[in-house]
Amino acid sequence: MKKSVLNYLRFSFLVLFIVGFTSTHFAVPVMAASGQTLGDLRTQLKELQNKYSTQQNKKKQTEAERNANIKKRNQAENELEDTKAKITSLTDEIEKTNQDIDTVKAESEELLRLYQQLESDNIYLSYITGASTITDMIMRMDAVSQLTDANQSKLDELELLIKSNEKLSKELDKYEGELGDKIIAYEASVDALNGEIEELEEGTVSLDKQITSLKESIKSYEDLGCKDSDVLIVCSKAAQNNSEWLRPVSKAKITSLYGKRKSPTAGASSNHKGIDMGVAEGTKVYATAAGTVGAIVRKSSCGGNMVYIWAYVNGKPYTYVFMHLKEILVSVGEVVTTETVVALSGGGKSTASKYGGYDRCTTGAHLHYGLASGGFYNSSNFNSHTINPPGYPGLYQWFYTR
């Protein structure tokens, strides 16, 4: 009997020791060690600020290049206008010269007719022989010859002038074409650079919002007393474990799946980093697992209002995100439960850019839900760790419970 009691005590002590050792050495350290620290947030902030500065410098360089091309285009347009004016002037000059040639030719024909008449009627001889002296006769003969030579010389000059003008006109036509090609090239370059500037502006706006969000996060955790080495989800007292995932709404239709798809906004193939649920704007969005609000982004040009929440499920760290929100009802550092209304859904007329809003990555009312595993992330590194959210039906299928 004593031996049985002793064995039972030994077994009980061993069980208590194993349970105590496991809970002390594995459960808490696993949750804490895999979490993001306040120091990590500060590092990310510096990286984002450096990236923002780089993009700003790139934008300035691109704007300078664009402006230089605009200047060259304007110069080419001015040259083109001058060239067109010269072509018009030359065309008028060629036309006038042609008229002069016609006049000289008519005069030459008249002289020829006169010469022929002189020869037949002896008028030329009478004119010559009517001279009073030899000198007068020579002068009269020379006058007739000079008149003929001058007429022919003028005709030759006019023909040379028209040939020269025609050659210059062809050269100007060629130059006009070259200027036109240059202007087209400058326009194409300006359009391309404007596109780059637009992308850079979007990128810097997005980075600016991420920086603002990260600063808010850092301030929030500092207010909670977190130190740089503290794991945020632990120091915010939200390191509770969840045994399952719930859904953010009680009823919805799956309108887009996780993974490869044809983008509804860009039209090209894209990699969708979550699932979309068709719900009316203003639908209450609940936390899918208890945790802490890690980051908030407001009015992003692609995604609109976003909330990132950190949580543990079955002892593993995750980050989940809601996008295209009409209204955010939580703040960074806030501890949430599965009954917490995190936000109201949007994505339609209240936020979409096609209705005059700020979110270009939505075409209608819906909720985007994304999930990342392995740690606690914000908008700058979330997409690199996404997984397919579990527990949802197929495309265009409905669910009716959380």
Image (spheres, rainbow, N blue to C red):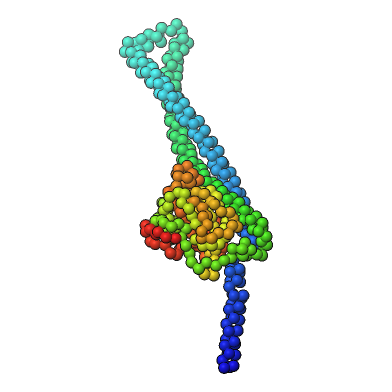
Residue 269 seen from this side:
no
Quadrant location, the C terminus: bottom left
Image quarter for residue 75? top right
**Is residue 23 found left or right of 165 in the rendered image?**
right
**Is residue 155 found left or right of 33 in the rendered image?**
left
Which is more toward the observer, 220 or 188? 220
Q: Furthest residue to the front? A: 1
Location of residue 236 with respect to 283 vertically, above or below? below
Which is more toward the observer, 14 or 46? 14
- x and y percentages locating residue 345 in the rendered image: 47, 51
- x and y percentages locating residue 376 in the rendered image: 57, 63
Q: Which residue is drawn at 54% across and 62% down?
A: 290
Location of residue 7 with respect to 222 vertically, above or below? below
Q: Which residue is drawn at 34% across and 10% down?
A: 122
Q: Which residue is drawn at 57% across and 56% down?
A: 295
Q: Furthest residue to the left? A: 120
Residue 27 seen from this side:
yes
**Is residue 39 found left or right of 140 in the rendered image?**
right
Quadrant location, the N terminus: bottom right
- x and y percentages locating residue 50 in the rendered image: 62, 54
**Is residue 378 found left or right of 349 in the rendered image?**
right
- x and y percentages locating residue 350 in the rendered image: 47, 45
Q: Residue at x 67, y 60 (%)?
A: 225
